[in-house]
Image (spheres, coloured by chain):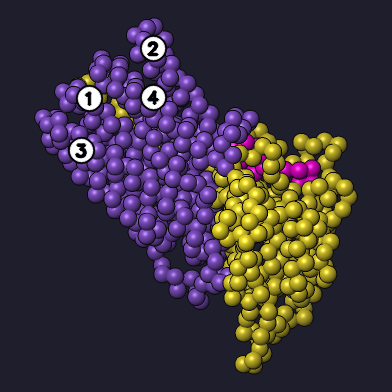
Chain colours: A yellow, B purple
C-alpha cells in the first residue's frame, strides 16, 4: 500500500472516499459474482440494458458458444462469457468425454484504486458515497483517456451503428461520451439493489456490502474446494492486489485469462510518481540539450 | 523478458483470442498533436536561448514556430474530443493524477505566453515584457515536450506503460530534433548553427532512446517491428538519420541541403509519433501482451514491475 500512500500524499486526497462524504457516507457496496452457479441465462444483460436505457449496438452471430455480446463496452455493462472445456467439473479423471461449460457474468470491477477515475481530466469520473465509480455524463467531454487506462477494458466511448447497418433507420446521434456500469447508482439512492442482481435467478450475482460479500465468498470457495471442484479461485477479492481489490469481484473456475480477464491487473497510476520524476529528468535533459547547441557559438 | 512464449509454461489461453484491453479511441489528431506540441515546446526554449545569445533571426524564427505549434495544438485536441463544445471542462479541475489535466494547463499557459510574446514581436513593442513572456513560454517548453510521454505511459497499454522509463526521453529528444530542424529550414544557414546542432543532437538522442526502449520492452515491444507501427518506425529511423546526416555535413554551405535535411528530420519525427501511437493500438489488440507479462509477474512476484 506504500505506493498508493505516496500518490495520496501527492494529490492531497484521503486514502478512501469515505472521509469526503461526511454524514452521507454509506458502506462500500459491490457485487460478488459466483460463476459456479451461473446458468448463462443473460437476464443480467437484459435487465441492465432495460433499466439503464442502453442502446442496441448491432447483432452479430459470433460462433463463440452462446456468447454474442463478446465483451463489455459502452453499450454492454454486463457480459456473460461462455467457455466450453473438455474437462470434468470435479476431480481429474472425467474420462475422454468429460465436458464442462463455464459461464461468468462480467461487469465493471469498481476498483479500490480506479485508473479511469485517476486519469479523468474533467473530474467526470468520481467515487460515490457507496465507494463505486461512476461517470457524470453531463460533464464528460469524450477525451477518451479512461478507455486505455482501464486494465480490464471495461469503459468505452459510445459509438452507435452506422446508418447502413441499422435496418430500422432510426439512428440516435453519435454520443461521443464514455459509458460503463454505474452499479445502478440511481437504484442504490432509492434503496434498491442493482437491476442485474435483482434479475439473477440463481443468485450468481450477489449484491451487498463488500466486507460481508468477501466473507461469503471465502465460505463458498472453501465449500467448493472441499467438494473437489476443478480450479475454483477468487478473483479481485484481495485488497492487496494491484488495484487494491475490486468492489465487484468473482469466484472463477479457471484462470482469469480463460474468461478474458487480466491475471494480475495493476492500476497504471501506481507508477505515476515515478513517471513524473522521469519526466522531470527528461525535461531537464531537453533544456541542457538546447543550451548545449549554443556551446559551439550563437550562430 | 526475452524468453519465448512457451517458457511461461503451457500455451497461453485466452477468451476466443479476444483483446482484454480496449484500443484507444484517439483519432489521427493525437499523433499530430504529439508532434506539434513537442515542436512548440522545444522551439520556445531554442528561441529564448537564441535571444539571450544575441542571435535575433533565430530567436524570431523559433518564436514564430513555437506560436504556430501552440496555435495548432489546441485545435487538434479539441477536434479529437467526443464533445468538442465541452473542451473548457478540461479546466474544471487540476489533477496531478491525470497527466492530461496537467498537460491541459501547461498547454493553456504556454499558448497564452507565446501569444503575448509573438504579438509584441510583431508590433515591435515592450521588449522587456516580450522577454518575460518568452521566458514563461520557454519554462513551460520542456514540460510541454515531455508530458505527453507520461500521458500515454499512464495507461494499461503494455507497450506504453512498460516504456515509462524511456518514453519521456524519446519524446523530449524528438521535440528537440523537430524544433532544430524547423528553425534550420527557415533561418539563413549562417545564423542557423545552433538549430542544426540541436536537430542533429536530437536525432541521435531520439534514436538512442528508442533503441534502449525497444531493448527493455522485449516481447512487449513487438508492435514496433510489425504492422503499421513497424512501418512508421522504419520510416522514422530512415528519415531522421538521412536528414540528420545532411544537416551535419552540408547544410552550413547549402541552403538546399538545409531545407532537404530539415524536411527529412521533421518527416521522421512525425513518423516516430505515429509509430508510438499505432504501437499502442496493436499492443491493446493482442491479449498476449497483457497475459504473458502478468503471468510471469504472478509467478515471480519479486521481479515484478
Rendered location of residue B83, percent (x, y): 59, 39
Is B264 part of what is drawn in magenta?
no
Residue at (29%, 53%) from the top-left corner? B234
Rendered location of residue B226, percent (x, y): 36, 60
Q: Is residue B173 above or below residue B22?
A: above
B164 relative position to A4: left or right: left
Q: Mark 2 points at which residue?
A: B120
Q: Which of marks 2 and 4 is nearer the N terminus?
A: 4
Q: Do labels 2 and 4 share a chain?
A: yes
Which of the pair B194/B276 is nearer the observer? B276
Q: Which of marks 3 and 4 is nearer the N terminus?
A: 4
The magenta segment is A117-131
Q: Examine the rendering and report whether any part of residue A220 can be seen.
A: yes
Disc 3, SS: helix
The reply to whether the C-beta atoms of the residues labelled 2 and 4 are less than 8 Å apart is: no
Q: Do labels 3 and 4 share a chain?
A: yes
For the N terminus of chain B, the quadrant is bottom left
The reply to whether the C-beta atoms of the residues labelled 1 and 2 are less than 8 Å apart is: no
Is A124 part of what is drawn in magenta?
yes
B144 relative position to A198: left or right: left
Q: Is residue B283 above or below residue A26?
A: below
Chain ID at mark 2: B
Rendered location of residue B247, percent (x, y): 18, 36
Q: Which of marks 1 and 2 is nearer the N terminus?
A: 2
- What label does residue B67 carry, if any? 4
| Badge 2: residue crowd in 10 Å (few <14, some 14–19, many ≥20) | some
Spatial CA span between label 3 and label 2: 31 Å
Q: Are marks 4 and 1 on the same chain?
A: yes
Q: Mark 3 points at which residue?
A: B261
Amino acid at each position: 500500500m506504500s505506493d498508493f500512500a505516496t500518490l495520496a500524499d501527492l494529490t492531497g486526497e484521503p486514502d478512501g472516499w469515505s472521509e469526503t462524504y461526511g454524514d452521507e457516507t454509506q458502506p462500500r457496496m459491490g457485487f460478488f459474482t459466483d460463476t459456479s452457479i451461473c446458468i448463462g441465462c443473460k437476464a443480467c444483460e437484459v435487465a441492465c440494458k432495460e433499466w439503464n436505457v442502453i442502446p442496441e449496438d448491432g447483432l452479430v452471430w459470433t460462433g463463440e458458444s452462446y456468447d454474442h455480446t463478446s465483451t463489455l463496452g459502452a453499450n454492454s455493462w454486463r457480459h456473460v462469457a461462455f467457455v466450453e472445456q473438455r474437462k470434468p467439473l470435479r476431480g481429474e479423471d472425467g474420462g475422454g468425454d468429460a465436458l464442462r461449460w463455464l459461464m461468468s457474468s462480467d461487469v465493471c470491477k469498481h476498483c479500490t484504486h480506479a485508473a479511469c477515475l485517476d486519469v479523468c481530466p474533467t473530474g467526470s469520473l468520481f467515487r460515490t458515497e457507496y465507494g463505486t465509480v461512476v461517470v457524470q455524463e453531463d460533464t464528460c467531454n469524450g477525451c477518451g483517456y479512461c478507455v486505455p487506462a482501464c486494465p480490464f477494458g471495461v469503459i468505452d466511448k459510445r459509438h452507435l451503428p452506422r446508418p447502413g447497418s441499422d435496418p430500422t433507420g432510426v439512428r440516435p446521434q453519435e454520443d461521443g461520451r464514455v459509458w460503463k456500469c454505474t452499479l445502478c447508482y440511481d437504484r442504490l439512492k432509492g434503496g434498491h439493489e442493482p437491476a442485474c442482481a435483482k434479475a439473477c435467478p440463481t443468485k450468481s450475482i450477489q449484491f451487498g456490502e463488500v466486507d460481508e460479500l468477501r466473507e461469503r465468498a471465502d465460505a463458498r470457495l472453501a465449500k467448493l474446494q472441499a467438494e473437489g471442484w476443478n480450479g475454483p479461485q477468487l478473483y479481485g477479492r484481495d485488497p492487496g492486489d494491484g488495484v487494491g481489490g475490486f468492489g465487484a469481484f468473482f469466484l472463477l473456475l479457471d484462470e482469469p485469462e480463460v474468461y478474458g480477464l487480466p491475471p494480475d491487473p495493476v492500476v497504471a497510476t501506481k507508477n505515476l510518481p515515478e513517471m513524473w520524476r522521469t519526466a522531470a529528468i527528461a525535461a531537464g535533459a531537453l533544456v541542457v540539450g538546447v543550451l548545449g547547441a549554443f556551446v559551439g557559438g550563437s550562430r | 523478458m526475452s524468453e519465448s512464449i512457451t517458457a511461461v509454461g503451457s500455451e497461453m489461453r485466452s477468451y476466443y483470442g479476444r483483446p482484454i484491453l480496449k484500443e484507444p479511441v484517439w483519432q489521427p489528431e493525437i499523433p499530430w498533436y504529439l508532434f506539434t506540441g513537442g515542436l512548440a515546446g522545444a522551439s520556445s526554449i531554442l528561441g529564448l536561448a537564441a535571444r539571450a545569445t544575441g542571435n535575433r533571426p533565430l530567436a524570431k524564427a523559433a518564436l514564430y514556430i513555437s506560436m504556430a505549434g501552440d496555435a495548432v495544438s489546441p485545435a487538434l485536441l479539441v477536434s479529437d474530443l467526443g464533445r468538442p463544445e465541452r473542451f473548457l471542462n478540461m479546466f474544471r479541475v487540476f489533477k496531478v493524477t491525470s497527466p492530461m489535466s496537467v498537460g491541459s494547463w501547461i498547454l493553456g499557459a504556454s499558448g497564452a505566453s507565446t501569444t503575448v510574446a509573438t504579438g509584441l514581436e510583431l508590433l515591435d513593442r515592450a521588449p522587456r515584457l516580450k522577454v518575460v513572456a518568452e521566458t514563461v513560454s520557454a519554462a513551460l517548453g520542456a514540460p510541454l515536450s515531455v508530458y505527453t510521454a507520461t500521458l500515454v505511459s499512464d495507461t494499461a497499454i503494455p507497450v506504453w506503460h512498460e516504456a515509462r522509463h524511456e518514453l519521456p526521453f524519446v519524446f523530449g529528444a524528438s521535440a528537440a530534433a523537430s524544433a532544430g530542424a524547423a528553425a534550420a529550414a527557415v533561418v539563413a544557414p549562417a545564423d542557423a548553427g545552433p538549430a542544426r546542432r540541436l536537430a542533429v543532437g536530437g536525432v541521435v538522442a531520439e534514436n538512442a532512446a528508442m533503441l534502449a526502449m525497444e531493448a527493455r520492452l522485449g516481447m512487449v515491444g513487438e508492435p514496433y517491428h510489425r504492422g503499421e507501427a513497424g512501418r512508421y518506425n522504419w520510416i522514422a529511423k530512415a528519415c531522421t538519420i538521412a536528414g540528420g546526416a545532411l544537416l551535419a555535413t552540408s547544410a552550413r554551405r547549402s541552403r538546399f541541403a538545409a531545407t532537404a535535411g530539415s524536411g527529412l528530420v521533421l518527416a521522421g519525427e512525425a513518423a516516430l509519433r505515429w509509430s508510438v501511437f499505432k504501437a499502442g493500438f496493436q499492443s491493446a489488440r493482442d491479449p498476449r501482451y497483457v497475459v504473458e507479462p502478468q503471468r510471469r509477474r504472478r509467478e515471480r512476484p519479486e521481479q515484478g514491475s
